[in-house]
Amino acid sequence: MLDFDILLPAILNGLSTGAVYALVALGLTLIYGVLHIVNFAHGSLLMLALYGVYFLYTLLGVDPFAALPVVVPAMFALGYALQRTVIATASHGREENILLVTLGLSIIIDNLALYLWSADTRTINPSYGFSTVDFGIAFIAVPKVVSFAGALVATGLLWLLIRRSDLGKAIRALARERRGAELVGVDVDHVYAMSFGIGIACVGAAACLLLPSYYVHPGVGESFVVIAFTVVVLGGMGSFAGALLGGFIIGVTESLGGLLLGENLGRIGVFAIFIAILLLRPTGLFGQRA
Amino acid sequence: MKTPAIAAAAPLLALAALPLLLHSDFWLHFAIMTLYLALLGQAWNLLGGYGGQRSFGHAAFFGTGAYAAALLQLDFAINPWACMVLAGGFGAGAGAFLGALSFRYGLRGSYFALVTLAFAEVFRIVADSVPFTGAGVGLQIALKESVADFQFPEKSGFYAVILALTAIATALAWWIENSRFGAALVAVRENEDAARALGIDVDRTKLWAITLSGALSGCAGSFYVQYFLYLDPRIAYGVEVSVTALLVPLIGGVGTVLGPLVGALALRALNEASSAMTGGAPGLNLVLYGALLIVILALLPDGLISLGTRLRRAGRLSALGHA
Amino acid sequence: MLEVAGVGKRFGGLTAVEDASLHVREGEIAALIGPNGAGKTTLFGIVAGFVAADRGSVRFAGEEILGLKPHVLARRGLVRTFQLVEPFAGLSVRENIAVGCQLRQPRRAAALAEAAAVAGRVGMSELIDRPVSALTIAGLKRLELARALATKPRLLLLDEVMAGLNPAEIAEMVPLVRAIREAGVTLLLTEHVMQAVISLAERVYVLNDGRIIAEGPPARIVADERVIEAYLGHGAAGRWPRRLGEGGAHA
């Protein structure tokens, strides 16, 4: 019924979207791995970043890919500020309250966007939007190729940061053993905020890579939250390799699901995986803690 | 802090007299919506407040009850009053289903919140895609304005019903505070292992809590359908219901009998005030909800109801300072 | 009353318990001791139904109970306490104990009244209506004891009930534990505080590296070479003076 000619592009498209999902999930898993908080506002912040990229393009003519050096640091700063000011203070450190604070943030951001920019779906049409790259076996749209490559590069950079830099060492130490890290002089509040900031910077990068082949409206955050969580839970909370692999799996699942069942019901495939993982193997593919 | 029976009953008795004083439709609607929010809040409070299992997807139970009520009267011509009871049953069923899956697999805290969220979304997508539920267009109940059909020509009729429902929910909360089941539920919330070691069947306790919570939510859903005569997937299973359900008790006071009532009033008042100020712009009232949630968590994590004790304590401390 | 036979448990590559066997006679006070990491907590957890065993059998009052859930065991009369006491926060001492009473007493009001009686048995009568946040460590330990007693157990597993107590508090707790046995409850303790073990236990099992290496009355155990070496290291038995077996005030 479905032959290779239809399946293959769907799979490749899925891989491309999946790479971006992986980038979003990386931020989320970093935040969970270090701060042990489930950031409900992750999707909303992605939506915010998407709007940022959108307006940079429509108002200032900045190409989304070229906007990376602006959007990424801006989102980092936002993330740092949010953790340091709102999240840390409002939750008083209690885990169940952190969850609610991030939920509150997501509600505020989602609905502020609705109020400011209405519910209209917005897309951009860059000049290369419809050009494709010939891979021999299939044609893939240029934006998707770039986002795939960009996501992999970003992941590599993040890995380097965490594994090789001093900040990365501090982050890993804090994630493992908070007391110990404090004792050796790690500024806990600062590193927490840095980690959150990096996680949100990932979201900023993902937004730049995503918009050319996607769209934005205020509800986008909600759908991304569950996808991001699914990837993180599938890959294992706190695992980078897991987020990457999980992203690809979910991207392809969503693509194939959309092909077979239509976009709406295709979404259910992702949720089904999410629920199944939570119930059957909450540690995910590579995760350590349940 | 236990609430004595008088303290729980008094506000409800006072509210019963309200329609005698209020004749304006606006204020009756305000009161009805406040009590409706209180009902939803009591439902969440049962599981999240007393039970400590904080769900982010209570819409899953609310919406199931709402759709049950609507479909049973539209497609099966069942009397709408009976539909309310059945809606409670369907809500309970949804609760039991979700609970059986989540609790048997040991899901707690964030994972439990996530799974409830996921289920609510799945239900929404299904309702949106399936013609049986009217898909995205939704369902409409014909206006009949007859009491036999659970529709009232005067708002005061609806007021009586919602007051009764909320009174039942409040009574249930009071019973929980004073019963063996309630003590077990609170023990489970505070320390599952210790509860187990003392002979409490933790899974079954949680399952009962979520089933009761689902039943009440389902009733709230059916009331919504009767009052507004319209239902669609976003209303039934959307995030707004889930967020409202948890916001009401959190603002008022989790794990207390009167907390949801206080929270409902605060939220409704906020809603009206913000609509008046912003002219009902889309999204703004939810922005205020989110901001309120964060402010409450930061300043009054035990809810508005703890304001009294906090002020008293502050007063006592300052008195000591001056002694 | 309690027969543990050949119980084994591995966590991944680590063998926590290997071929452990012990038995406790009705009305006896038995103790399970051993250096840190010996596997006492795991074995305790297995008997109390909190940890699944890989192999072996646990019989309580003649019936096989391995694999049964903790709340089922509690109903049968096997109850454990926890070393790290976490009371039910936000409730009073009475309400905490009443949760235990509820196992046998379905009526809430009666349970609350019974809680007062149980509190009296552990000497907490004056604290009965105070919030648990006001309790000291010693108070928390008594609360833990009271909660467990409220369930009217036949066998009580006390998990390091003396941990965190100063000598004066230990001296108060020992007769309390003995009184519980006098009331007809069989006791199995895990303990680090030797003074308590020697004063209370009639039979002591020593666990080291997951295996039971010695069994017997406290006086003999304390002088046992293998036990001394388990605690103090290889060759220590030869260097340690033999006087330990007498008097028995400390080890």
Image (spheres, helix red, strand yellow):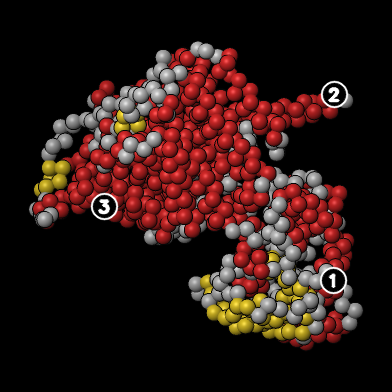
Q: What residue type is labelled 3?
A: Thr
- C185 vs B142: above or below: below
- Residue C61 screen position, x and y as percent: 68, 77
**Where residue B303 sits in the image (x, y, percent)?**
61, 32
Q: Given the image, on which type of amino acid does mark 2 rest?
A: His
Residue A16, percent from left and from top: 24, 47
- Residue at disc 2, secondary structure: helix
Q: In this view, does C186 lie above or below A269?
A: below
Position of the N terminus of chain B, as image quadrant, is top right
Query: At 45% across and 18% down in the image, what residue appears?
Result: B154
CB contact under 8 Å: marks 3 and 1: no
Asked if both marks, 3 and 1, belong to the same chain, the answer given is no
Q: What residue type is labelled 1?
A: Glu
Q: Say left or right for A249 vs C117.
A: left
Mark 2 packing: few (<14 Cα in 10 Å), some, or many (20+)? few
**Circle 1 residue:** C182
- The span from disc 3 to disc 1 (Cα, nearest Å) is 66 Å
Label 2 resides on the chain identified as B
Residue at label 3?
A253
